[in-house]
Amino acid sequence: DVKVTQSSRYLVKRTGEKVFLECVQDMDHENMFWYRQDPGLGLRLIYFSYDVKMKEKGDIPEGYSVSREKKERFSLILESASTNQTSMYLCASSRLGAGKQETQYFGPGTRLLVL
Amino acid sequence: QKEVEQDPGPLSVPEGAIVSLNCTYSNSAFQYFMWYRQYSRKGPELLMYTYSSGNKEDGRFTAQVDKSSKYISLFIRDSQPSDSATYLCAMSAASGAGSYQLTFGKGTKLSVIP
């Protein structure tokens, strides 16, 4: 059974704190993604990675950075948390498609509240 | 015009009803179409995956793609209270390197009332 896990389900942080969100997948997938989900805005891609140490900006990378030192692990970093980063953060992974779209498998999400 | 449009609902139906959920899109290069189901406070899970035009059936669920109209649908027959969730459509053009990204609709919240 495919599995994507995220380090925390709920997180409360203060403005200005550095925040680390971790994601681990056990499917040996090449691709990993970080999204945020907000009411009325849907899922928005922050960053994705198609290989170890490789990263690409998504639609809303400002205020975020990522790290992928191992194939199974993809971290999202909020260098200095702000209240507008309060959101649900979702990690996903997929295989490297050979010319076709591969299914993305999602983790359970982390609800982050920045006070 | 947004790339993918999806009515956010909420949609409320009685148990046993047939549910129709829809998305329209503008990018004619899209050829892979997915429906995800997301229960409250959980991550999305893949429900249906179709390639190009046509229908695909899986139990009570049928996914339909009409590329000429740029319109996709998900039908749920004999809806159950356990179908209450938010349904997200997703699609991509996917061909070759770099084609990893999915474009999502904003989701339709469905409630099936016993």
Image (cartoon, coloured by chain):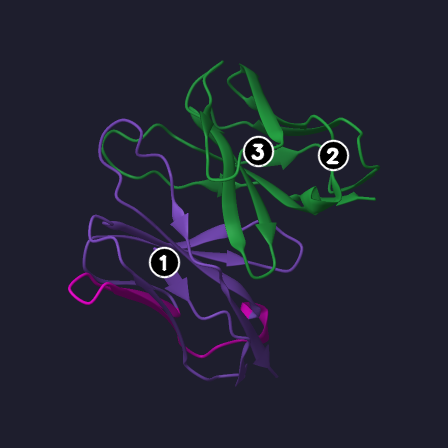
Q: Quadrant of residue B102?
A: top left
Q: Which chain is green?
A: A
| Above/below status of B114 relative to A82 | below
Q: Which residue is mark 3?
A: A62
Residue A54's mark? none
On the rendered structure, is A84 left or right of B67? right
Contact between labelled residues 3 and 1, with CB atoms less than 8 Å apart: no
| Above/below status of A113 relative to B111 | above
Q: Chain of mark 3?
A: A
Element type at marker 1?
Answer: strand
Residue B76, horizontal then vertical, whole percent: 41, 73
Would you say residue A78 is visible in this rendering? yes
On the rendered structure, is B42 left or right of B95? right
Residue B4's mark? 1
Q: Chain of mark 1?
A: B
Three-letter code for the amino acid on which mark 3 is drawn: Glu
Mark 2 vs mark 1: give the one in front.
2
- The color chain B is rendered in: purple
Q: Residue at x 30, y 31 (%)?
A: A97
Three-letter code for the amino acid on which mark 2 is drawn: Ala
Would you say residue A29 is visible in this rendering? no
Q: Which is nearer the eye, B36 or A39? A: A39
- Part of the protein shown in magenta: B60-83
| Above/below status of B7 relative to A35 | below
